Image (tube, grey):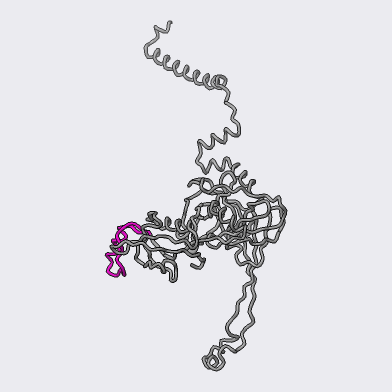
Amino acid sequence: MGFSKLPRSIRQLTTHLLAILMGVVFTVSTVRVLPSQAEPAPSVSNTDSGQLLAQHQSPATAAIGNRSFVTAAVKRVGPAVVRIDTERTVVSRQRRLDPFFDDPFFREFFGDSFPQQAPRRQQQRGLGSGVIFDRTGLILTNAHVVDKADKVTVHLKDGRSVEGKVRGVDEITDLAVVKIDAGDNLPAAVLGSSGDVQVGDWAIAVGNPLGFDNTVTLGIISTLRRPSSQVGISDKRLDFIQTDAAINPGNSGGPLLNDRGEVIGINTAIRADAMGIGFAIPIDKAKTIAAKLQRGEKVSHPFIGVVMQDLTPEMAKKFNQDPNSPVEIPEIKGILVRRVVPNSPAATAGIRPGDVIIQVDGKQTTEGEQLLNIVEDSEVGQTLQVKIRRGNRTQQVSVKTTQLRSSS
């Protein structure tokens, strides 16, 4: 009996079964044939694989997958990073042998003639970091690491410990230069340019935090030109590099590197309340200061003596609406003088609280940072022509700068 003579229902069932069977056969054949017909996978070098990882992963993951730039940067500068130990003798003296002698009777009749306790001498020890920037043994570090130290000991990466001599200290920028005699061919770090640094660049901090030598932390540049006033260091005159690379006590004076192993900053300004934030002095500023300190020169910091605040018309209007405001402030954009330091150049020139500085030596000034830069770029003893607004009047005064002291 032919297939065509079979009942229709049987023919349909048979057709479906054949279709299913053909599908299974085709699938199995495909699985077996595709590997043999596929082109061989292209070979990928280590460099290419790193590039592919970087294309398909986040920057943080890519850095973990390809961390050779950190290793290379640290190897380049590591031997030039040193640990600095300091010792300082502090003398303390108590007023009386016994509180009994503070009785008014004894003070009236005997005054200060009672014997006092012998002075107590205590040894204070400090720890910091530094970086060799000249093969003859010149080291750049923070001023607060070595200032007023009686003894400075520098520990090199090769295991040697050498006495260091402080060449110069500048408290205003928190920078110092130390000299060691350990040969004329010491490893020296390459000082880069902080002017080329951008937010988001890699940042590598190297130092000896908490006494743990040769510690490396990695992060990025969080922001640039962070004023020292915002950092909480009002007695400094600096704009910091801010980074999220971990910087702990003992890191002070160590280098902050870019991804090529060049020094872009000197780590400093640790705040106890700063979670995951560190600060570094830009290396361009440090190079200028270090050049003077290594020659034993005093670094000049001109000073006029005003405590200021950036002012906008809106701020001035709000201030003037306060019935308790001591003066009426011009509702303009400028630099508000909040306080004048007694016996300062500004006080001598007649500048008062409530004045608004709008121009210095013909340059418009609307922000405090502009005024600071103009003053810092001047010379000690130079006379600056300062234009101010006082109420509705505009006048110009002559201010002769003096040297800024750290206590100012």
Measured from the top left, where is residue 404 in percent x and y? Answer: 50, 64
Identify the image quadrant of residue 358. Answer: bottom left
Span colored in magenta = 310-334
Return the residue found at the far top. Answer: 1
Measured from the top left, where is residue 80 in percent x and y? Answer: 65, 51
Image check: 84 left or right of 233? right
As drawn, 258 above or below 7: below
As drawn, 51 above or below 392: above
Residue 180 magenta-drawn? no
Residue 313 magenta-drawn? yes
Identify the image quadrant of residue 331. Answer: bottom left
Observer-nearest residue: 390 or 276? Answer: 390
Measured from the top left, where is residue 381 in percent x and y? Answer: 48, 63
Identify the image quadrant of residue 385. Answer: bottom left
Report the number of numbered marks: 0
User: In the rendered image, which quarter contains the N terminus?
Assistant: top left
Picture residue at 37% right of the left edge, 59% below the top: 310
Picture residue at 55% right of the left edge, 63% below the top: 171
Observer-nearest residue: 330 or 192? Answer: 330
Observer-nearest residue: 379 or 252? Answer: 379
As drawn, 16 above or below 227: above
As drawn, 394 above or below 265: below
